[in-house]
Amino acid sequence: MSIDFKSTKGIFLQIAENICHQILEGKLPPGERVPSVRDLAADFEVNRNTVLRTYALLDESGVFENKRGIGFFVSENAVEMIRSTEKKEFFQNDLPEFIQKIKLLKLNENDLSELITVIKTN
Amino acid sequence: MSIDFKSTKGIFLQIAENICHQILEGKLPPGERVPSVRDLAADFEVNRNTVLRTYALLDESGVFENKRGIGFFVSENAVEMIRSTEKKEFFQNDLPEFIQKIKLLKLNENDLSELITVIKTN
Amino acid sequence: MSIDFKSTKGIFLQIAENICHQILEGKLPPGERVPSVRDLAADFEVNRNTVLRTYALLDESGVFENKRGIGFFVSENAVEMIRSTEKKEFFQNDLPEFIQKIKLLKLNENDLSELITVIKTN
Amino acid sequence: MSIDFKSTKGIFLQIAENICHQILEGKLPPGERVPSVRDLAADFEVNRNTVLRTYALLDESGVFENKRGIGFFVSENAVEMIRSTEKKEFFQNDLPEFIQKIKLLKLNENDLSELITVIKTN
DNA sequence: GTGGTCTAGACCACA
DNA sequence: GTGGTCTAGACCACG
């Protein structure tokens, strides 16, 4: 997974999502040390400060833990932290927006039932 | 519907949506002259340049028509244009994104059925 | 009130404290616009990014509100936000540390009662 | 007492405090040889350089004595040194800071009396 | 080696 | 004009 430098979404956020996905997929197990800021910056061909910002974000959101002078580690309950955060965002932001769009579109019965089928089968 | 100055969504876009919804609801019928930039800016407590940008956007996308020296008017086929545009965007962009989010969240049965109930009842 | 560039405490934190004190003293009333990032940076003879970091911090802690393209404003409940935050920090961090120090010092009765007198009269 | 790797306080300082407390409690009596850097580092699961830095600090401040080629020993007057140093620091730095914080917080009567109760009962 | 802060300067979208 | 992001490079304390 690589970075889209043209996206409107900040690079540091893309990296954060990237890392969170890796944690959810088990590629970065809880307790494991993550690459140093400098190394990951080199990997992504990105500035050190950008990665640092990502790490600081994940640190204060409880996904990472920071051991002084050693580095960042995936916190033990990282998976739950990510899941709960994403779930909250989904039900508070994404779902309401989605529903409002549906309302404004005034979809007919057919469209609506088709839509639900699509959601169910995915 | 008012404007959220804290949102990440541009204010000129929020105003555009607002106007489109008014057109769809018949408050701004096709052919009608649109409020002046100055008035609308005062209504929304917003900079005139911001409204100007909204009008330029709607003009460019065919929702408005600019009669030189007179002002902006709602184009005759504005309703269809908005509807078709929104529908296309919805099924091409919003829905796929929404479904991917659901996938990534790995919602359980309960969450999913609740989600569908919410969609149906709205 | 000026900045101590030699302090171990980050400059952006010193600026944050400075602003919070101004709010508590009523010099920056709720609803008022704060100086632009650029202006305050010039005032403190500090880099723009440093002030930006301060403002972002105060924004996400609810002391500031950010109106797009216009600037930062003191939020309506800024005073309570600051007070509650400081109080929480005091009782959770400072007070326990202080008590532990007293314990380890094994102060005698005289010292302790004198200490309390000092606290009371201040 | 264990080490908080997330604290902003340097680990070598935390270890120094730990050792001083052991001396005050008599677990490390004056004249006794101090554990080897290697052993202590293993105990605390910490880098040897970190312990080395702690020992250097305690040596410099007179709590330890370094017998060349043998190792570090708790100095004969270590207890008094620690006590006097800590007492001086407490009344010159910690207490004034603590009082200033209370002033800035503008605690009400309830909070203040609760605070004093907590101090007394500890 | 690690993270943390700061600077100077560029570029962007938005009002 | 506003804030927001990113870069490059410096300096620091800590392990």
Image (cartoon, coloured by chain):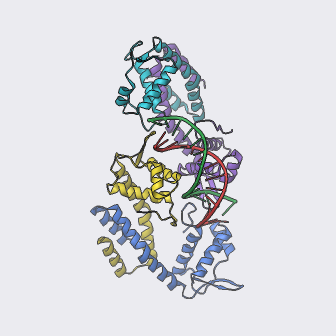
Chain colours: A yellow, B blue, C purple, D cyan, E red, F green
- Camera-nearest residue between B72 and B25: B72
Quadrant of the rendered image containing residue B12: bottom right
Residue C91 in view, yes or no: no
Q: Position of residue D4 (x, y in %)?
A: 42, 35
Q: Position of residue D10 (x, y in %)?
A: 48, 33
Residue at 39%, 72% (x, y): give it.
B96
Along the horizontal axis of the image, is C35 left or right of A43?
Answer: right
The quarter of the picture where the N terminus of chain D appears is top left
Residue at 50%, 25% (x, y): give it.
D116
Q: Position of residue C51 (x, y in %)?
A: 62, 49
Quadrant of the rendered image containing residue C20: top right
Along the horizontal axis of the image, is A78 left or right of F2?
Answer: left
Q: Is B58 situated above or below A7?
A: below
- Camera-nearest residue between C101 and B20: C101
Q: Is B85 situated above or below A87?
A: below
- Camera-nearest residue between B93 and A1: A1
